[in-house]
């Protein structure tokens, strides 16, 4: 396997971000880190970070920064969180309680103090989970559990690359044995046997991979890069092209990608320019009008209601925003933390005859 990687991005969350914390001040007492949940569109928030432990004193995630959140595609109560310095946490009760993934051999990984860059849950087996981590020794690993975190094993180790990282891991929803893996050199690797072997399918030289998203059709793949914009493949990663975003200055910095499940062919990008939207799987684009002007902030997180394309949430270094009309108007929402809403997730469940929306965000602090 090709092991060329770019220089480590100096940031606990593997993103170099420039903004300050959220404008909404945290309460004088109470949690500041971890997860928060709202069931009224972001007006009221509740902390969701209780950690199950045998210790006498209560343990919570209130001091943790969340780098990534992944859920089981078929069971939204199964949640996996990656932190910037405390490894992996998981919940099987919809975030009401969490457990921390324990250390495992080799001891040098120190999983409970590692940076977690990416997590992916197998759509056919909720107990099969992959993660990319950077250990305290600065080495990068791809790890896997196939027993719901009772044990973990190292799937691949980058022994000789002490200052470089694996970044994003994605599973093909139509072929779960096919994995795509991205690194900070801009390399994309593919495995067709659940990580047993790998091939380099493309290299975006000098453009670190930030995220990989595979469409439910299993063929369309979207890769957000630093400095290289959005890369796209329509044949599961065999051939590649780039989105034409030249008219949007700053769109070469892609921070996040969100699929619009309700529309099916919809896609939103969070960039240095702002939010860009495509309704045809990346072939054409338009910019949403935001409360902030183009290039005035960084769109670090986006989530779309999976049953209503008009309901969109996004987070920046200074705020949290919501629209109910597809971006025609926006409302600023206060969040109960001094940190940034770096990860947003919207879940909709049927309760009786009604669809009930839950909005989650994970907190994160920019590197000083």
Image (cartoon, rainbow, N blue to C red):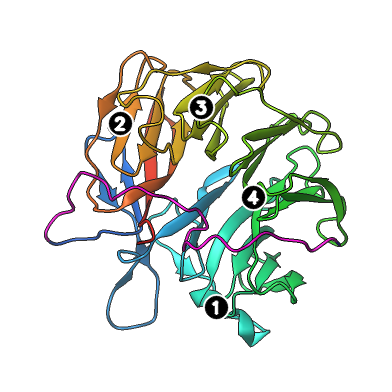
Pick the residue in front: 46 or 356: 46
Lower sequence index among marks 3 and 4: 4
Q: In the drawing, what numbered circle is on residue 208?
A: 4
Q: CA distance from mark 4 to mark 1?
A: 21 Å
Residue drawn at 26 percent across, 25 percent down: 331
Pick the residue in front: 62 or 241: 241
Q: Position of residue 127 (x, y in %)?
A: 66, 59
**In the rendered structure, which segment of residues is drawn in magenta?**
2-28
Lower sequence index among marks 2 and 3: 2
In the image, residue 348 sits, relative to residue 163, either above or below, namely: above
Q: Secondary structure at mark 3?
A: loop
Looking at this view, name the residue that lies furthest to the bottom.
Answer: 107
Q: Is residue 145 left or right of residue 35?
A: right
Tag in front: 2 or 3 = 3
Q: Secondary structure at mark 2?
A: loop
Lower sequence index among marks 3 and 1: 1
Lower sequence index among marks 4 and 1: 1
Q: CA distance from mark 1 to mark 2?
A: 38 Å
Q: CA distance from mark 2 to mark 3?
A: 31 Å
Q: Which residue corresponds to mark 1? A: 136
Q: In the drawing, what numbered circle is on residue 249?
A: 3
Q: In the drawing, what numbered circle is on residue 41?
A: 2
Disc 3: CA contacts within 10 A as few (<14), some (14-19) or many (>=20): some
Q: Position of residue 64 (x, y in %)?
A: 37, 64
User: Do we see residue 352 in this rendering?
Assistant: no
Disc 4: CA contacts within 10 A as few (<14), some (14-19) or many (>=20): many
């Amino acid at each position: 396997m090709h092991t060329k990687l770019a220089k480590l991005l100096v940031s606990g969350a593997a993103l170099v971000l420039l903004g300050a914390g959220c404008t909404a001040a945290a309460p004088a007492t109470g949690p500041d880190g971890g997860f928060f949940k709202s069931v009224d569109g972001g007006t009221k928030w509740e902390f969701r970070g209780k950690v199950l432990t045998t210790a006498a004193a209560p343990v919570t995630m209130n001091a943790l920064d969340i780098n990534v959140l992944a859920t089981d595609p078929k069971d939204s109560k199964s949640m996996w969180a990656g932190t910037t310095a405390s490894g992996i946490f998981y919940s099987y009760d919809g975030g009401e309680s969490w457990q921390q993934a324990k250390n495992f051999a080799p001891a040098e990984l120190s999983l409970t103090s590692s940076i977690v860059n990416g997590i992916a849950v197998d759509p056919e087996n909720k107990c099969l989970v992959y993660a990319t981590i950077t250990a305290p020794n600065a080495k990068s690993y791809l790890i896997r559990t196939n027993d719901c975190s009772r044990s973990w094993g190292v799937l691949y180790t980058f022994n000789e690359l002490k200052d470089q990282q694996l970044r994003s891991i994605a599973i093909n929803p139509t072929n779960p044995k096919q994995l795509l893996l991205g690194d900070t050199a801009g390399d994309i690797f593919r495995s067709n046997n659940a990580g047993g072997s790998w091939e380099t399918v493309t290299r975006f030289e000098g453009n670190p991979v930030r995220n990989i998203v595979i469409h439910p059709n299993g063929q369309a793949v979207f890769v957000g890069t630093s400095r290289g914009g959005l890369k796209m493949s329509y044949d599961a990663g065999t051939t590649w092209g780039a989105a034409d975003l030249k008219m949007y200055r700053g769109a070469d910095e892609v921070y996040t990608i969100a699929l619009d499940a309700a529309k099916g062919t919809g896609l939103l990008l969070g960039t240095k320019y702002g939010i860009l939207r495509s309704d045809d799987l990346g072939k054409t684009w338009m910019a949403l009008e935001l409360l902030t002007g183009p290039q005035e902030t960084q769109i670090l997180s986006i989530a779309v209601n999976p049953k209503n394309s008009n309901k969109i949430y996004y987070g920046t270094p200074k705020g949290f925003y919501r629209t109910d009309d597809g971006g025609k108007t926006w409302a600023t929402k206060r969040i109960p933390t001094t940190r940034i809403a770096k990860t947003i997730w919207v879940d909709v469940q049927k309760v009786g005859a009604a669809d009930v929306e839950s909005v989650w965000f994970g907190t994160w602090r920019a590197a000083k």
